[in-house]
Amino acid sequence: MSTDRYTSPLSERYASKEMQYIFSQDMKFKTWRKLWIALAETEKELGLPITQEQIDELKAHAEDINYDVAKAREKEVRHDVMSHVYAYGVQCPKAKGIIHLGATSCYVGDNTDIIIMTEGLRLVRKKLINVIAELAKFADQYKALPTLAFTHFQPAQPTTVGKRASLWLNEFCMDLEDLEYVLSTMKLLGSKGTTGTQASFLELFDGDQEKIDQIDPMIAKKMGFEKCVPVSGQTYSRKVDTRVMNILAGIAASAHKMSNDIRLLQHLKEVEEPFEKSQIGSSAMAYKRNPMRSERIASLSRYVMIDALNPAITSATQWFERTLDDSANKRLSIAEGFLTIDGILDLCLNVVDGLVVYPKVIEKRLRSELPFMATENIMMDAVKAGGDRQELHERIRTLSMEAGKNVKVEGKDNNLLELIAADPAFNMTLEQLESCMEPSRYVGRSEIQVTNFLRDVVQPILDANKDVLGVKAEITV
């Protein structure tokens, strides 16, 4: 590791080796060479005077890229594609004259970008499905455990731990739907020429329209795609980058929401992210167990959400058939968006797989607030016993305010039940009131909602993707 120059934390700390390879120089330039081979093969098959010997020579050097030659050449000509055309030609003297024939720089640049983003989306999809699988296990395990719910972060009608997790899970399932749609729409640019008119191929094939129509489908098939874009300028529409980055930003938003909830729950000591035996929570306060993984998820997620603006603005500001002010931005924004979401999903896997739940703390907090939640039931029972609903509503409101004052001003325990038992308007004993305090009575359909959601929505996803399950994330630091 170089210590005397900037190195990206995405490669040093956050992103997996698998995602780093997808955005590596090797992946990029080997793909360029595969595209040049596909173009040469297609042109040969359509009748241009290209020999099998030339094709074989290109294939023999598809992997062993002579970076030193390409870098030296780029210093002279200031053009990355032509530098690599030259370097490939040095290795392939017989095929030198037919490399990149009829193509423009975007033939290798843009097609490679689409291929790399598609591979990146496939890896994101695999990790996202594994996050869904881990969350589904957690939601199922705790679907019946009552917990205090919050609206406005104020105590509200109880839910269950598993039902709350299903809210996180549902958002990730929505992200998967969006991802799979966009993945299904990914198309190669093909070989469209300088302004997208294929004029160079019209010249090469002496105006044979039928042969020219076959070029893009043949290249697409060779590169593992079904189709090329139907029309373009020199580049594919940069709106494709916007769609892709919006998918990553959506996943980041879901991860951020989950991580925020976990951080708040860890503050309440109800749920904790994993904390390793030798892990240090604070340099000053040795007792602390900071939710650093969830904090990192939130931090990185904000970066991805903001990064989605880059391709959106780039797409909006392209000039006519092509301009080059997209290139430097794309090199950063697309790669960093994918590397960052990769790190986020690894963190999500790690956190969800090791979540620790503290039922006793959860029950204690729930019971401290439950008398307030039970007032509607208590009032209905009192009405059944002959009380007046409107009078009882006012009495409960007054007593609730008094109990709330005891808790917040006096620092005492919640004594609402005692106050109600002492009020003759309710005609209920303390024992009768305490019998109403079973938490499971107040969680509504939480358990069955989780069961139905896991059965009807999540399990079909997992059943259809058994081949990608079992990913275990390794957190570098």
Image: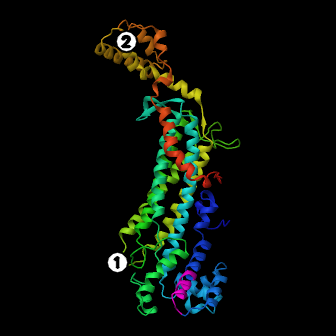
**Residue 244 percent across, percent down from the top left:** 46, 62
Single out the residue that lies furthest toward the front. 210
**Residue 295 percent across, percent down from the top left:** 54, 47
Looking at the image, residue 95 lies above or below residue 293: below
Residue 74 in sight in this render: no
Q: Residue under circle 2?
A: 382
- Closer-to-camera residue (467/269): 467
Which residue is located at x 45 percent, y 61 percent? Answer: 182
Q: Does the magenta run of residues contain 38?
A: yes
Which is more N-terminal, label 1 or label 2?
A: 1
User: Which secondary structure dominates the residues rendered in magenta?
Assistant: helix
Q: Does the magenta run of residues contain 40?
A: yes
- Closer-to-camera residue (388/198): 198
**Residue 408 percent across, percent down from the top left:** 44, 23
Magenta range:
37-48
**Residue 253 percent across, percent down from the top left:** 46, 50
Q: Residue under circle 1?
A: 320
Q: Nearer the viewer, mark 2 or mark 1?
A: 2
Left or right, residue 393 beside residue 422 = left
Which kind of residue does numbered mark 1 sit on?
Phe
Colour style of the rendered protein structure: rainbow
